[in-house]
Each structure stands twice: as structure tokens, then as C-alpha cells.
Image (cartoon, helix red, strand yellow):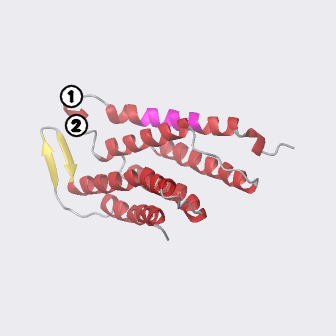
Amino acid sequence: MNLANRITLARIFLVPVIMFFLLIKLDLGSIGFADFSITYNQIVAALIFIVAASTDGLDGYIARKNKIVTNLGKLLDPLADKLLVAAVLISLVEMDKLNALIAIVIISREFAVTGLRQVALLEGSVMAASNWGKWKTAIQITMIIALLLNNFPFVFIDFPFDTIAVWAAAIITVYSGIDYFVKNKHLIPVE
């Protein structure tokens, strides 16, 4: 168990902590300015999410830099990413901050691409993350943070950044999924 794998495991263990703050009805109070209000629970969950999401690139960087890439890390890293994003998306749906259809589209794409990656592994090849996949991840994380923070600070200038981020994430998620399948169609057995 090397440092990179420990960081990945920490990301997995932070998932239920984030969900606890989002879904358990604790009244830790809230902060309000004019028409804006946010609970301390959301702030704590958003901060933990930011820490967890920031470890996504860190574990891979450490593994490559120190030449400690392991099969366990190759398995756990994408799993940790999917768990983190899916859990928070489902929580946002439960909190009525995200349309369930958007969450289903994003989560479905993640499962489909993960399945394609598994087929690639069985064929003896590894599908590297594409640039579209990296953009997808960055935009999904941005969207989640905007939703967790109730569109702060954009709410003060009446700019719907959170809504734009949701649609951008949905569109790029679908596009990047299609891109993976088109570029790797040779892995899909057609009879």
C-alpha cells in the first residue's frame, strides 16, 4: 500500500462523510446575505468535496513521479472518482438541487465508459483518459461545487453560473462518452 493508493483510498472514505453532511438533517445553522442563504452543512460538504476532488490528480501524479503505479491503483483511482461524483450527484438530486435526468445521464456515461475500459483491459490494452474526459471531469467538479454553494458568488450578480455549469457538464459528459466509444469501436464485438 503506497502513498498514491492511500490518497485514493482516502478519497473513497470521504464519500460517506460528504453524504453525511448533505443528507443527514443536522441543524448546524446557516449564513445569509440579502436573498442568499447557505447551511453550514453545505459549506462543510463542499470543502470536503473540494479536498477529495483535488486528490484525483495528486494520486496519479505521485504514482507516476515515484514509479509506484500499481494494478490496485489503476483499479481504485477511477472507482474512487466515480463513487465521489455519483454519490454527490445523487445527494444533489435528493436535495432538489439537480434534475434526476442530468444525474442519470452523467452516471450512465461513467458506467458505460468504465465497462469499455474493462473490455479494453481484457483485450490487453489500457484506455488512457482523453482530453475530453479530462475536461468532463473538471466541468463536473465545477458544476458540483457551484450547486453545493448555491451559486455563490454568482448569485450576487444574478448570473446563473450553476445552471450553465449543469448544462455544460451534461453536454460535455455525453460528448466525451461518444468520443470514447467512437475511438475504441474496435473493442466492441459486432456480430
What amino acid does circle 2 point to?
A: Pro
| Residue 115 locus on image (x, y percent) | 66, 52
> Is the residue marked by circle 2 packed among few (<14), some (14-19), or many (20+) residues within 10 Å?
few
* SS type, badge 2: loop
What amino acid does circle 1 point to?
A: Ile
The chief SS type of the magenta part is helix
Residue 99 belongs to magenta span: no
**Numbered tag placed on residue 157 in the rendering:** 1
**Numbered tag placed on residue 153 in the rendering:** 2
* SS type, badge 1: helix
**Residue at 52% in and 44% down:** 106
| Callout 2 touching callout 1 (CB < 8 Å) | yes
**Residue at 62% in and 51% down:** 114
| Residue 184 locus on image (x, y percent) | 71, 40
| Residue 25 locus on image (x, y percent) | 28, 63
Please state the total of marks drawn on the protein image: 2
**Residue at 71% in and 50% down:** 125
Q: Give the range drawn in magenta.
A: 166-176
Residue 175 belongs to magenta span: yes
Q: Quadrant of residue 141?
A: top left
